[in-house]
Amino acid sequence: MTNKERKARYYNKLKKDADLYSYAPIALRIREVANNPNASAADLANVILHDHGLTTKILKLANSAYYPPYNRRISTLTHAVVIMGFHTIKTLALSVSLYERFQKSDDGDSMMRTFWIHSVATALCSNQIAQMLKYKSGEEAFVAGFLHDIGKLLISFFTPVEWDAISMKIEMGYTSMQAELQQLGTYHTEVGEYVGTEWNLPENLLAVMRNHHRIGVRETKKSTEPLVDIVYIANLIAHRVFHEKGASVCSLKDLKRQAKYLLNLSSEQVNKLIDFVKQNTTNTAEELSIPIFSLNDVGESQEDASVEDETTLKEITALKNFIQRKNVEKRLMFELSESFRQSTKISEIYTAFTEGFFRNRLFDVVILFRVNRRVEYLEGVLAYGVESQEEIRNYRFKLSSKNNVFATVVEENRTELVVDVTQPAYVDTIDKSFVDSLNITSFACVPVVVWGKVESLLMVSYYNEDSVINDDMIEMVHLIAMQAGSALERLIPNKRLIE
Ligand SMILES: [Fe+2]
Ligand SMILES: [Fe+2]
């Protein structure tokens, strides 16, 4: 299923199953007031007042939005509606009552608590940035920061099965964005915007929900809605202070560079913001009765990394990459054995097998050759990362040429690893124009064996000259190729290869 199809299916489900106001009686009453053109600030306040907990939280949030200074402490809801605006208070009430449902129903969900903390941290930070930049409304920035990730909350409330699947993927090592895309064909950013539109939220809030990860936007390109960049940077800072599973943490250097590009914030200002979030989130969250349990200080010093630290940083990065790759491999093996099990066509097995390596970024070049025993040729059938998928059909290797690496793989049923194509030892065994056309320096060929014979072979490689394929990676490809072979035995009659 493509992401587009997945997305359509998800939205259908959301439209069919979810009355986007039905999660709490208070939300339904808020909708009535909000839909009434004659409703006043007092009418909205009256509805919210029925829920004591909600009233307290909204007043606390409203006061946090004005922090600092507290010179005009907001003590009544009507006052809050007048100052912060009808739509803002309506939005806060809708989302806070949604949060409340979670707190009551699922105390053990650590992801949800971390989510709360993250929302408060982003809200406070957005508000601070707004003040530094003299942005027109600090309260607006606060509310935008508080609600930016509401798409996640909506996914988990209205479609809990999908949420569980996403959480599981995050546990397996996917980032939350990857997990969402795989499961829903879309991201929490778009779901937030979709529901926000149904709730009639103002356009600048919708823009923040939609674009706060700046997906596909050039790093240096400022957003047309300044609130988007404010929340984008606040979100990065919040993630540095409070770690959240599935979120990638931006390095301090990178954070400062982006804050400079997008908002013209200085290095000191970023340091101040980090300190501010560290010092104030906990208090604000406690005031809002959010239990704190996962406070992690930033791991790095707030000074830019010195040259001496560079080596250590490099080692750490290499180790992190290694662990990440291992996670990807583990996940891929799990994923592929599942799709092999479910496949009912030979082509499905081959597509999953080859595409998996490319999609998970384990290799830049992945080509599948089928053995054509009738004409004694290897024929390219599937290719990823090669300029033209069609072109691959032109790659043919005659199996009779004795020294050819590909022929060896087929005839001797063994994996071949070529670590440097330019070495003299390989001159006669590799089709030079072929590897040149792929722009690679090392590659590996792994056979897929069905009923004891090589049915096809997979060639994998990188474009990157610095990274050479190693035995460890080949071992993994080999294991998956064996699984693919057994799956193919289910679909290919034994006779076909014995003839
Ligand atoms: Fe987000
Ligand atoms: Fe976020």
Image: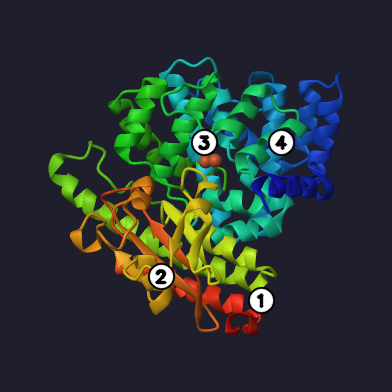
Q: Position of residue 312 (x, y in %)?
A: 19, 51
Q: Is residue 335 left or right of residue 199?
A: left
User: Please, what secondary structure does the residue beneath circle 3 have?
Assistant: loop
Given the current orientation, which residue lies at the most extreme left position?
Answer: 308
Ligand 1 lies under 8 Å from the Cβ of mark 3: yes
| Disc on the earlier residue, 1 or 2 | 2
User: Please, what secondary structure does the residue beneath circle 1 have?
Assistant: helix
Q: Residue at x 75, y 28 (%)?
A: 200
Q: Which residue is mark 3?
A: 213
- Residue 189 lies, with reference to residue 13, above or below; the image says above
Of residue 72 and residue 309, the one placed in the foreground of this image is 309
Q: Position of residue 66 (x, y in %)?
A: 53, 25
Of residue 85 and residue 308, the one placed in the foreground of this image is 308
- Residue 122 lies, with reference to residue 391, above or below; the image says above
Q: Position of residue 472 (x, y in %)?
A: 33, 69
| Disc on the earlier residue, 2 or 4 | 4
Circles 2 and 4: CB atoms closer than 8 Å: no
Kindly indicate the quadrant of the structure image that contains residue 78: top right
Ligand 1 lies under 8 Å from the Cβ of mark 1: no
Residue type for callout 1: Leu
Q: Which residue is mark 4?
A: 194
Circles 3 and 1: CB atoms closer than 8 Å: no
Residue type for callout 3: His
Of residue 211 and residue 495, the one placed in the foreground of this image is 495
Q: Which residue is mark 2?
A: 400
Compute the Cα span from label 4 to label 3.
16 Å
Residue type for callout 4: Tyr
Question: Where residue 491 is drawn, which disc sits there?
Answer: 1
Q: Which numbered mark, 3 or 1, is in the foreground of this view?
A: 1
